[in-house]
Image (cartoon, rainbow, N blue to C red):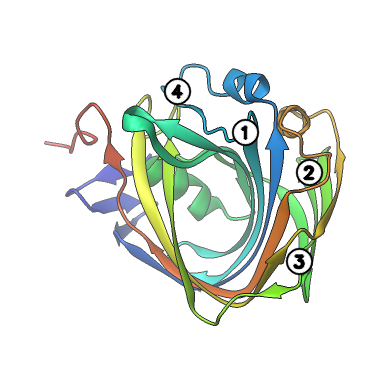
Amino acid sequence: MAELLTDSTWTIQGRTVTLPVTITRAEVSVAVFAAAPDAAAHHLRGTELEPWTVGGRAFSILMLVHYDEWELGVYDEVGVGMLVAGPGLKMGLHVLDLPVTGTFTCEAGQDFWGLPKWIMQADLAFAGRTATVSVHDGTEFVVQARLVAGRVPLPPGTGTSMPVWSRLGYGAQAGKLLRGEMPMALSRATFGRGSASVELGVHPMALRMADLGMAGRPLFVMHAGHATGSLGAFATVGGQHPRRPS
């Protein structure tokens, strides 16, 4: 388990990492789906979070990401999350599953930011506006997906900042409600209604995806061929930062 040395410096697997860390280049596809509020609320029990709803709909998010070399390594990532409201009705993304192909980023994500990372076996590929992935947990099939982004172009260097809520039951941040920000700059990006084809297994992640409407048509799909950003320390909400060793 990682150890906190200062408010922003950790030791992990024999290395020292100081936050924020800079994402030098990633390729990203994101699909947003409509979800039933009751189903969304079921998956938030015990988190102090509630679904963010508009017009009687909650919103689930499927993220496919490839990271080039940065502080946490080179790896692929598949995220399943929801838009939520936390204390103070502050909107943000809450991730339910975040399987990755790298062991270092898996432990760092759990301990630094309370993110639900686990090791997957995956084939992830991008071709223009299209992203495809097949995910297994060991030998168990989880999901196969194909996302095609809409055709509306975004201006080069479009900036966005995604608020993030997290609460994990294990790791260095166990039981803490955390909130942070992930600012990004997107290039070679398009968005629009697009399309998604999602085949699900019976793995817990797949069952959550089915509950959250991810087998249906997406509201929109975005692809960015080049994304950069940073990820700093998350603040503990309603409590203290993780205790540093004496």
**Which residue corresponds to mark 1?**
55
Tell me if 12 is positioned left or right of 169 in this view. left
Between 93 and 174, the one nearer to me in the picture:
93
Looking at the image, do the residues carrying marks 2 and 4 touch, with CB atoms under 8 Å apart? Answer: no
Find the distance from the CA under tag 1 to the CA under tag 3: 23 Å
Q: CA distance from mark 2 to mark 4?
A: 27 Å
First-in-chain label (1 vs 3): 1
Local packing at callout 4 (Cα closer than 10 Å; few below 14, some 14-19, many 20+) is some
Whichever of labels 2 and 4 marks the residue nearer the N terminus, that label is 4
- Amino acid of disc 1: Gly
Please state if 172 lies on the left or on the right of 58 as rendered. left
- Give the mark count: 4
Name the disc covering residue 150, or none.
3
Q: Earlier in the sequence, mark 3 or mark 2?
A: 2
Circle 4 residue: 47
Front residue (pair 2, 219) = 219
Q: Label 2 belongs to which residue?
A: 136
Res 242 quadrant in image: top left
